[in-house]
Image: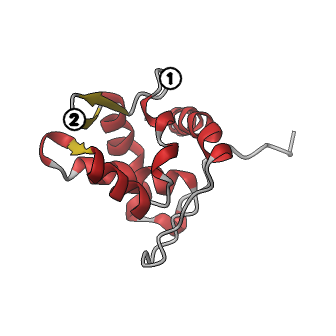
Amino acid sequence: MTSEQIRALLKIGEEALRKAQAVFAAEQDPHNEEDVSDPPLRWAHLLAHFMGAPNQALTVEQVRHAARESGFDPRGLGAFYNIKTGWLRSEEDLRVLTDAGRHWFETVGKRILNDPKGWPSAAPKEDKTG
């Protein structure tokens, strides 16, 4: 996967979450020692909860807990379910990681979690040389 493809995936996620972030300020868990203020790092933290769950599915209460641990207000997660991003879907009483969410986590999220301090912000940098 090229850096342009990774940037495109990040941009899709960033756009989807921008509205939710505007409505609900991210709630930082005071017991969380990691800095999850960067959106891609928070996305990776949240999706990691699904990756570690049986069938990559969580109950609504587990999603709320995972959201708080990842620096989100649980009420602002709707963007993860939208058609454009589609990283999560509802199946009866469970919330399930989709193929798109799994793909983003495997190609980008793991890299972010492995080196959160070395990961650039989701926003593509403007080229001011040309």
User: Residue placed at 30% from the left, 37% from the top?
Assistant: 102
Q: Nearer the viewer, mark 2 or mark 1?
A: 2
Give the amino acid type for the residue marked by disc 1 in the picture: Lys
- 54 with respect to 2 (left or right): left
What residue did someone put label 2 on? 93
The quarter of the displayed image where residue 25 is located: bottom right
Q: Are marks 2 and 1 in contact (CB under 8 Å)?
A: no
Q: Number of marks in the image?
A: 2
Q: Quadrant of the C terminus?
A: top right
- Residue 41 visible to the viewer: yes
Relative depth, front residue between 121 and 66: 66
At mark 1, the secondary structure is loop
The quarter of the displayed image where residue 55 is located: top left
On screen, 43 above or below 90?
below
Give coordinates of residue 93: x percent, y percent. Answer: 21, 35
Give coordinates of residue 49: x percent, y percent. Answer: 28, 54
Q: Residues within 10 Å of mark 1 (few under 14, many from 20)?
A: few
The quarter of the displayed image where residue 70 is located: bottom left
What residue did someone put label 1 on? 84
Name which of mark 2 and mark 1 comes first in the sequence: 1
- Residue 110 visible to the viewer: no
